[in-house]
Amino acid sequence: MDKERFFKVYANLPLNVRDQVVVVLDGEPITWRVANLEIVEDTESGRQILEKLANLEII
């Protein structure tokens, strides 16, 4: 369900916003584009990113 919400938000972002930092994971800034790649590939980082975005009510 978080994935669906993420993809809906991501699809509606202006292209220039996709290069902006959306979350910091393990001290590393993560842009919307990187978050999308991690979530699409279903990595552990992708799952952590989804969790953080949901907790922050960004998605």
Image (tube, grey):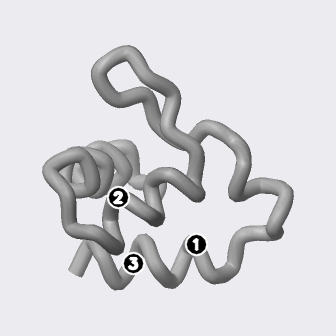
Query: Which residue has dot 1 on it?
Result: 10
Q: Label 1's element?
A: helix
Q: Label 3's element?
A: helix
Q: Mark 3 against mark 2, which lies toward the viewer?
A: 2
Q: Residue at x 37, y 50 (%)?
A: 53
- The answer to whether mark 3 and mark 1 are in CB contact below 8 A is no
Q: For residue 31, what is the image quadrant?
A: top right
Amino acid type assigned to the residue bearing label 1 in the image: Tyr
| Residue 32 appears left or right of 1 | right
Position of 1 relative to 14 (above/below):
below
Question: Mark 2 or mark 1: which comes first in sequence?
Answer: 1
Q: Residues within 10 Å of mark 3 (few under 14, many from 20)?
A: some
Amino acid type assigned to the residue bearing label 2 in the image: Glu
Q: Mark 2 against mark 1, which lies toward the viewer?
A: 2
Q: Label 2's element?
A: helix
- The answer to whether mark 3 and mark 2 are in CB contact below 8 A is no
Q: Residue at x 58, y 57 (%)?
A: 33
Q: For residue 14, what is the image quadrant?
A: bottom right
Question: Mark 3 or mark 1: which comes first in sequence?
Answer: 3
Q: Any mark on residue 5, and which? A: 3
Amino acid type assigned to the residue bearing label 3 in the image: Arg
Query: Which residue has dot 2 on it?
Result: 38
Q: Residue at x 72, y 49 (%)?
A: 19
Q: Residues within 10 Å of mark 1 (few under 14, many from 20)?
A: some
Alpha carbon distance from label 3 to label 2: 15 Å
Position of 10 relative to 44 (above/below):
below
Q: Mark 3 against mark 1, which lies toward the viewer?
A: 1
| Residue 16 appears left or right of 6 | right
> Residue 22: horizontal and vertical position, in percent?
55, 42
Question: Mark 3 or mark 2: which comes first in sequence?
Answer: 3
